[in-house]
Image (cartoon, helix red, strand yellow):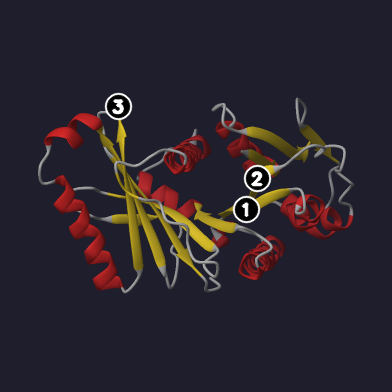
Amino acid sequence: MNVIGLGQAGCNIADSLSVHPQYKAYKIDVGIEGTRCYDVKYQKGPEEYEINVPSMKTFFRGIKGETMFIIGGSGHISAMCLRIMEQIKDKCELSVLYVKPDPTLLSKTKKLHEKATFKILQEFARSGLLKMLYIVSNTNLENILGNVPIIGYNNKINELLVSTVHMINVFKNSEPVMGKIENPSDVCRISTFGISEIEKGEEKLFFNLDNTAERCYIYGINEERLATEGGLKKKIIDRIRSSSNEEGLQASFGVFPTNYEQDYCYTLNYTSIIQ
């Protein structure tokens, strides 16, 4: 899978994913150096970044297949995203991971720019120009982690996000022992990730998605527990039925064996509604 990081936040996430051999990272930022890195000239504001997007045909030469474009919404450089994607949309199967900042921490200019970018990306997803738009909120990630120290804040946030994205991708390419990771309907192209407690069923989303229409629960459970705990199947089925009945959404699930001592439940949540 290709991952393209734009700006400091996007590049850091792409870097973290590329630790795993399944990902090939491309990074675009001001002053960046290294393999598959594109050094962008510094601009004063988002309008200048958008106007001065260079041709990246050589940089992206040979790119193909599944590709995730990673954008942090707070940076002026994110204004380049649409014109960059225009250059590669016919070469690969393109999704976007959009990291939504806390709007209270943005200047007026950044707030207006972020709002416009966020809306346009959602329209792109709904029209089918993107395979999927995944939205995550720094505020939600911080709330999930609890008290995060100032030093190392971004590392802790990214660690949660990257581990979730990676494990979901691993399970998508693995064979479940029960259930199946269902693809969402064509109209549901706006999404977020989540984690859920297996015992209590409490769910924590990475973005407060309105009007969730479809949800897939992805269970990673210790193989020995799968082989010995008799009531586990009923517990999982009851959870899926509860979601379908109480929330009025279409729920699916997949159960995967792991060698980890700790069990996990991730969720993929989908809607067709602009947020």
Q: How would you rate the neighbour count of disc 1 (Cα within 10 Å): few for under 14, some for 14-19, many for 20 or more? A: many
Residue 168, position as x, y percentages in the image = 44, 43
For label 1, the residue is 95
Residue 222, position as x, y percentages in the image = 25, 32
Residue type, numbered disc 2? Thr
Which mark, residue 67?
2
- Secondary structure of the residue carrying numbered label 2: strand
Residue 156, position as x, y percentages in the image = 46, 37
Task: Report the residue at 27% width, 65% height from top.
Answer: 243
Residue type, numbered disc 1? Ser
Taking the image as drawn, is residue 31 in sight? no
Q: Is residue 39 left or right of residue 227?
A: right
* Residue placed most toward the observer, 183 or 122: 183
Tell me how far mark 2 sits from mark 1, CA to CA.
6 Å
Q: How would you rate the neighbour count of disc 2 (Cα within 10 Å): few for under 14, some for 14-19, many for 20 or more? A: many
Residue type, numbered disc 3? Asn
Task: Report the residue at 79% width, 56% height from top.
Answer: 86
Residue 138 vertical placement versus 10 (above, below): below
Tell me how far mark 2 sits from mark 3, CA to CA.
29 Å
Taking the image as drawn, is residue 77 in sight? yes
Tell me how far mark 3 sits from mark 1, CA to CA.
30 Å
Which mark, residue 259?
3
- Secondary structure of the residue carrying numbered label 1: strand
Q: Are marks 2 and 1 in contact (CB under 8 Å)?
A: yes
Q: Is residue 44 left or right of residue 231?
A: right
